[in-house]
Image: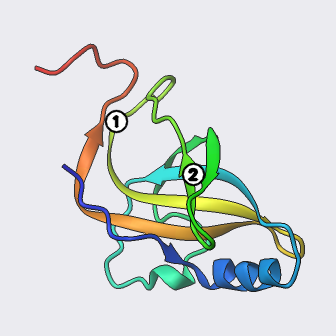
């Protein structure tokens, strides 16, 4: 099973959070899943996933405390042409100056395989 690290705010995400604390509305836009290897990259400097594979809508947002939100999305492989090892997840948000940005990022040390929609079961 995948072992995802905690979500890391990107530099752009941290800047947007500061704007939100000053009154700008924080609007999350989508989730991306990818197969990238973080390697020597600093997650804070990313502006997109290393190897994006799938974009999913946010199903719901729940506030779980004064400074915590839980975003829910449904992972489906419908329309996915090629399977991949899910090793990275990105949360995107709307910045009033920059447009849509990678807000936060996490990566797995032991990724799970997401089969294509053409797969009909496991062998």
> How far from the left and from the top, in percent, is residue 43?
47, 79
Residues at discs 1 and 2 in contact (Cβ within 8 Å): no
Residue at the far left in the pictured view = 123
Indicate the quadrant containing the C terminus: top left, top right, bottom left or bottom right.
top left
Q: Is residue 85 left or right of residue 29?
A: left
Residue at x 63% of width, y 70% of height: 103
The label on residue 83 is 1
Q: Residue 37: x percent and y percent? A: 33, 67
**Mark 2 surroundings: few (<14), some (14-19) or many (≥20) residues within 10 A:** some
- Per the model, the C-alpha gap separating discs 1 and 2 is 24 Å
Q: Can the viewer see residue 58 in this picture?
A: no
Question: Circle 1: is it few (<14), some (14-19), or many (20+) Cα within 10 Å?
Answer: some
Q: Residue at x 62, y 85 (%)?
A: 11
Image position of 60 with respect to 68: above or below: above
Q: How is the image coloured?
A: rainbow
**As drawn, 108 above or below 56:** below
Element on which disc 1 rests: loop
- Picture quadrant of residue 106: bottom left
Numbered disc total: 2
Q: Position of residue 90 (x, y in %)?
A: 53, 60
Instruction: Confirm whether residue 111 shows in the render.
Output: yes
Q: Which mark is residue 46?
A: none
Q: Position of residue 27 (x, y in %)?
A: 77, 59
Which circle marks residue 71 in the picture?
A: 2
The first of marks 1 and 2 along the sequence is: 2
Residue lying at 57% horizontally and 51% vertically, measured from the top left: 71
- Compare residues 110 and 22 and report the one nearer the observer: 22
Question: Residue reaching furthest front?
Answer: 65
Residue found 62% across the figure and 38% down from its top: 59
Please name which of the two marks, 1 or 2, marks the residue nearer to the observer: 2
Circle 2 SS class:
strand
């Amino acid at each position: 099973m995948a072992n995802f690290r905690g979500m890391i705010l990107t530099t752009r995400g941290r800047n947007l959070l500061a704007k939100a604390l000053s009154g700008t509305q924080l609007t999350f836009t989508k989730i991306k899943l990818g197969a990238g290897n973080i390697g020597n990259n600093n997650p804070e400097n990313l502006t997109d996933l290393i190897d994006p594979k799938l974009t999913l809508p946010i199903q719901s947002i729940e506030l779980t405390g004064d400074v915590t939100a839980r975003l829910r999305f449904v992972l489906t492989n419908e329309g996915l042409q090629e399977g991949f090892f899910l090793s990275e997840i990105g949360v995107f948000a709307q910045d009033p100056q920059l447009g849509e940005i990678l807000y936060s990022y996490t990566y797995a040390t032991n990724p799970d395989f997401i089969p294509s929609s053409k797969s009909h079961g496991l062998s």
